[in-house]
């Protein structure tokens, strides 16, 4: 009896909305202030947003070629099989399950609940109770599961509800994604227009440097790398479309177009949003802001501005969370179908034709991350691990061009081989600098948790399972041979 399979039901505009919706989350409402403090220059701030967008576009171009050539469910996991073999593909699939996809869902949904407190006060324990229980990871740091219990509870409810929607129908999940993507793009445009047409800003803010932050040499490089991490967190999600490539109509056409339309739209929106912030706020004021979007809009819209920003962030977070839930579980689903993951994860729901078990398993891990972490810790965790595999994915295009020269390529990356090479070199530099900075900050007492090292440990924790699943496949193969 043939197992049910996933159907191609996703069209171009749902593809575009998946790209844009998976990218635009809450970071654009929070990260610019942190980045302003790391750089001290409005020109550098805007430059970093543009540079991070262009670097992400390089990665997307590579992914577009490979995704159009291999339009299968599981995306990057299948790509890595073709590039590096089963072990490395499994390592990526495990990392996607254990860190990248689940932690990203948790971090984005976390922000929805934090901003919900603008309208309703969520319960939490006293500080003494919150600190009474902690999970200590040697040489990594402490996690406090009881911290901010009300926010964490609402976050878990949100993830569960959106998972239920996506389990019942790919089309329903797609409709939700199109709705939220359109809503948050319109909301961002509305906010930008309100700021620019208010007449309460000053174009001189675009060029006035900080009066207190002056960076040069190594400190400047470290500041740019740190700011890049914030921008990459805001741009992350463009890769998700490859996970559902097996469900996209006309993949050779819609995958490249969806990637470029979605990502270019986000780059433009992010740059003009930062310019709108700077138009109202000098860079020093921006650097000292905890909620930069609220502080920028308050002079324009008064106290109602805080409520408007909270709604914008909540809409953005909803759409981004849904986009990640819809796409990300497909990696574990494909691994299971190949015998490299828990068997039940690869089952298609007989009624709804969705990877329901994989979706619920990812939700379980995402909820564990919610209990254990916070927005900043989770963001740093999944961005670091994500960019490791982005680098390997870009290098893999050289391997595929050599191993599969005759394969049909509906789209070819422009600027080959230089564009993929620049991307690979940047990811290597980013990996080394981030690891060095995280460890240095922990040793000096600036931070209490080394997210990058913790991410690497979670990835390596999957290695014993690889050999377990390989043994199970061999046993299944021997049983089949004996029966025959």
Image (tube, rainbow, N blue to C red):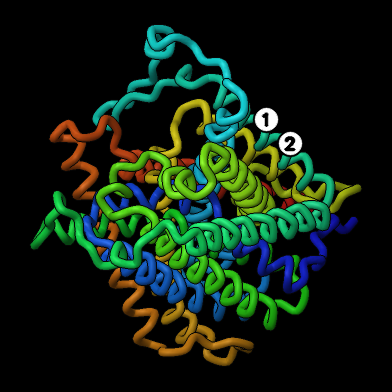
- Give residue 73's quadrant in the image: bottom right
- x and y percent of residue 93 in the render? 53, 53
Which residue sits at x=69%, y=61%? Answer: 182
* 167 on left or right of 1: left
Q: Residue at x 39, y 59 (%)?
A: 201
Does dot 1 land on a helix, a strand or a loop?
helix
Q: Which residue is mark 1?
A: 157
Q: Position of residue 451 (x, y in %)?
A: 34, 40
Q: Position of residue 12 (x, y in %)?
A: 73, 73
Determine the CA span between mark 1 and mark 2: 6 Å
Please say whether residue 307 is visible from this viewpoint: yes
Left or right of 78? Residue 162 is: right
Q: Is residue 308 left or right of residue 282?
A: right
Contact between marks 1 and 2 (CB within 8 A): the answer is yes
Q: Is residue 45 left or right of residue 149?
A: left
Q: Considering only vertical position in the picture, is 165 above or below 373?
A: below
Numbered label attached to residue 436: none
- Under tag 2, what secondary structure? helix
Classify 279 as above or below 118.
below
Relative depth, front residue between 58 and 44: 44
Please name the residue shown 69% across and 38% down the image.
360
Question: Can you say which quadrant of the picture contains the C terminus?
Answer: bottom right
| Residue on which the image places disc 2 | 161
Instruction: Inspect this view and state whether residue 339 appears.
Output: no
Front-most of residues 46 and 468: 46
Instruction: Report the front residue among 465 and 98.
Output: 98
């Amino acid at each position: 009896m043939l197992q049910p399979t996933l159907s191609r039901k996703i069209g171009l505009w749902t593809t575009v909305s998946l790209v844009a919706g998976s990218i635009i989350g809450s970071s654009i409402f929070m990260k610019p202030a942190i980045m302003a403090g790391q750089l001290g220059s409005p020109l550098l701030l805007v430059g970093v947003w543009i540079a991070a967008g262009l670097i992400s576009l390089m990665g997307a171009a590579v992914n577009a070629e490979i995704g159009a050539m291999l339009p299968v469910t599981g995306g990057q996991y299948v790509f890595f099989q073709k590039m590096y073999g089963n072990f490395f593909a499994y390592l990526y699939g495990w990392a996607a399950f254990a860190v990248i996809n689940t932690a990203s869902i948790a971090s984005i949904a976390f922000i929805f609940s934090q901003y919900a407190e603008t309208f309703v006060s969520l319960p939490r324990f006293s500080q003494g109770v919150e600190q009474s229980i902690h999970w200590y990871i040697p040489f990594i740091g402490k996690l406090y599961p009881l911290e901010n219990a009300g926010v964490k509870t609402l976050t878990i409810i949100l993830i569960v509800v959106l998972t239920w929607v996506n389990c019942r129908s790919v089309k329903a999940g797609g409709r939700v994604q199109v709705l939220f993507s359109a809503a948050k793009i319109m909301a961002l445009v509305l906010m930008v227009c309100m700021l620019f047409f208010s007449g309460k800003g000053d174009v001189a803010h675009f060029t006035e440097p900080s009066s207190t932050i002056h960076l040069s040499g190594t400190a400047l490089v470290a500041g740019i790398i740190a700011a890049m991490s914030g921008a990459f967190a805001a741009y992350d999600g463009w890769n998700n479309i490859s996970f559902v490539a097996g469900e996209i109509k006309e993949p050779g056409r819609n995958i490249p177009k969806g990637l470029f339309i979605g990502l270019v739209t986000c780059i433009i929106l992010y740059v003009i949003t930062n310019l709108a912030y700077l138009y109202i706020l000098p860079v020093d004021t921006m650097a000292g802001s905890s909620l930069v979007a609220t502080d920028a809009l308050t002079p324009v819209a008064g106290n109602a501005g805080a409520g408007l920003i909270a709604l914008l962030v909540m809409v953005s977070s909803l759409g981004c969370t849904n986009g990640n839930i819809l796409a990300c579980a497909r990696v574990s689903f494909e691994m299971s179908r190949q015998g490299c993951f828990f068997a039940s994860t690869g089952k298609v729901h007989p009624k709804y034709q969705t990877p329901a078990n994989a979706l619920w398993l990812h939700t379980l891990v995402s909820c564990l991350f919610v209990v254990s972490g916070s927005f900043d810790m989770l963001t740093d965790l999944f961005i670091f691990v994500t960019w490791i595999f982005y680098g390997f994915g870009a290098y893999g295009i050289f391997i595929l061009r050599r191993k599969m020269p005759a394969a049909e390529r509906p789209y070819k990356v422009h600027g080959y081989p230089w564009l993929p090479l620049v991307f690979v070199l940047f990811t290597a530099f980013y990996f080394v600098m981030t690891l060095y900075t995280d460890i240095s900050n922990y040793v000096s007492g600036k931070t209490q948790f080394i997210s990058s090292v913790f991410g690497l440990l979670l990835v390596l924790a999957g290695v014993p399972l690889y050999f377990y699943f390989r043994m199970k496949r061999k046993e299944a193969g021997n049983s089949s041979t004996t029966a025959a």
